[in-house]
């Protein structure tokens, strides 16, 4: 697999791996199996590993991020640190989900918390430096440029190499970038989640910032491999799109499946190829980070970098969003995602 350069000179593999998939959020797996998948990702040439301090099973009786996913990734880094570009995130203080943690401030971006979060992630990851460090969600009580100024201090201290932002608006991105170069924006972007194309993606192109789409396969829905029973017990089944609108959104799935059959690719490869094509059309380097608990799916996803979509396929796939029912937000607060603040 070839490398790609995001913003601020950050080089990664063309495809990344979303490590959230090997923790409790989409159903559990044991640590040894998860570590096996992480190693398989590296073996397949996927060297860009994405985690966050909030990923993992909550620890009973404690406040703040769990950090157990970072601890799992640390086991990979212990043997293969030189092979990995590690990205992690901070800023969400409690459990991810529709309800969150009652009585806990959902996000923090103050200077004290920035320093604490960086040191805590370094400790859990067992590394001396984080390659890409994202603000996971901005703190509405702290201007984003102030948070990024504190993050930049971690770069100066040698604890972080590059800075990123997750689910920011174009205005927030410009304010942050004026303080310190931003290497990447991470937000949901896929065939059925395209709101970032209105303002955020053009701002990335303007500023030379890369884009890292999370949930590039529609939380697995667009692959056509999920069943309703599979998602009913995790956060996906609690979303409108994959929960109550499951039947209605089969129309979107049928469009993707039809193109995939015609070009001789899988649904996942087709959806990822569309993102690469969309990045080229927008003038933005794109590194999707699908997650999986299967080594076979890793190989399937990695092959997407070689899939070419003709004009008819692109036009058909562009129409998928018009068939989708339900929004992409996983919580009730509309400001949790960038489009709710634009």
Image (cartoon, grey):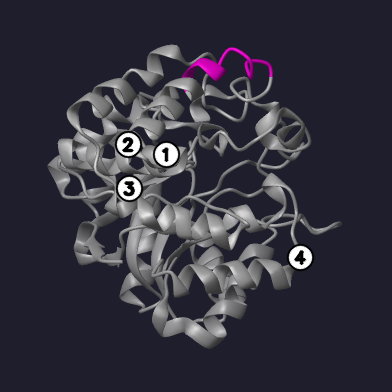
Q: Is residue 129 above or below residue 70?
A: below
Q: CA distance from mark 2 to mark 4?
A: 36 Å
Q: Residue at x 61, y 58 (%)?
A: 294
Dot 3 or dot 2: first in sequence order is: 3
Q: Which residue is mark 1?
A: 167
Identify the image quadrant of the C terminus.
top left
Q: Residue at x 20, y 65 (%)?
A: 9
Q: Residue at x 56, y 66 (%)?
A: 116
Q: Which residue is mark 2?
A: 263
Q: Which residues are magenta?
A: 244-252
Mark in the foreground, 3 or 2: 2
Viewer-closest of 236 and 96: 236
Q: CA distance from mark 3 to mark 2?
A: 45 Å
Q: Residues within 10 Å of mark 4 (few under 14, many from 20)?
A: few
Q: Pointers 4 and 3 in contact (CB under 8 A)?
A: no
Q: CA distance from mark 4 to mark 1?
A: 30 Å
Dot 4 or dot 1: first in sequence order is: 4
Q: CA distance from mark 1 to mark 2?
A: 33 Å
Dot 4 or dot 3: first in sequence order is: 4
The x, y position of residue 245, in whole percent, is: 63, 15
> In this image, 76 relative to 263: left or right?
right
């Amino acid at each position: 697999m070839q490398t790609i350069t995001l913003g601020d000179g950050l080089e990664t593999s063309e495809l990344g791996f979303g490590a959230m998939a090997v923790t409790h959020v989409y159903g559990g797996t044991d640590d040894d199996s998860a570590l096996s998948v992480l190693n398989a990702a590296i073996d397949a040439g996927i060297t860009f590993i994405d985690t966050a301090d909030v990923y993992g099973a909550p620890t009973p009786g404690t406040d703040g991020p769990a950090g157990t996913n970072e601890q799992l990734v640390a086991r990979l880094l212990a043997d293969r640190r030189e092979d990995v570009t590690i990205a992690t995130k901070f800023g969400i203080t409690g459990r991810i989900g529709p309800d969150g943690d009652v009585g806990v401030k959902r996000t923090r971006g103050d200077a004290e918390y920035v320093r604490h979060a960086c040191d805590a992630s370094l400790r859990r990851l067992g590394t001396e430096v984080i390659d890409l460090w994202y603000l996971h969600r901005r703190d509405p009580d702290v201007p984003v440029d102030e948070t990024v100024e504190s993050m930049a201090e971690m770069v100066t201290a040698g604890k972080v190499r590059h800075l990123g932002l997750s689910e920011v608006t174009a205005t927030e991105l410009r304010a942050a970038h004026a303080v310190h170069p931003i290497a990447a924006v991470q937000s949901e972007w896929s065939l059925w989640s395209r709101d970032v194309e209105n303002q955020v993606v053009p701002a990335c192109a303007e500023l030379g910032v890369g884009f890292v789409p999370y949930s590039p396969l529609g939380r697995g829905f667009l692959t056509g491999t999920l069943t309703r029973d599979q998602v009913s017990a995790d956060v996906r089944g609690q979303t409108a799109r994959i929960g109550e609108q499951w039947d209605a959104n089969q129309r979107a799935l049928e469009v993707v499946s039809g193109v995939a059959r015609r070009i001789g690719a899988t649904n996942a490869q087709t959806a990822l190829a569309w993102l690469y094509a969309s990045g080229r059309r927008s003038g933005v380097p794109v590194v999707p980070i699908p997650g999986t608990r299967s080594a076979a799916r890793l190989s399937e996803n990695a092959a997407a970098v070689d899939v070419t979509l003709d004009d008819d396929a692109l036009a058909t796939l562009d129409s998928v969003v018009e068939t989708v029912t339900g929004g992409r937000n996983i919580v009730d607060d509309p400001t949790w995602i960038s489009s709710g603040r634009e």
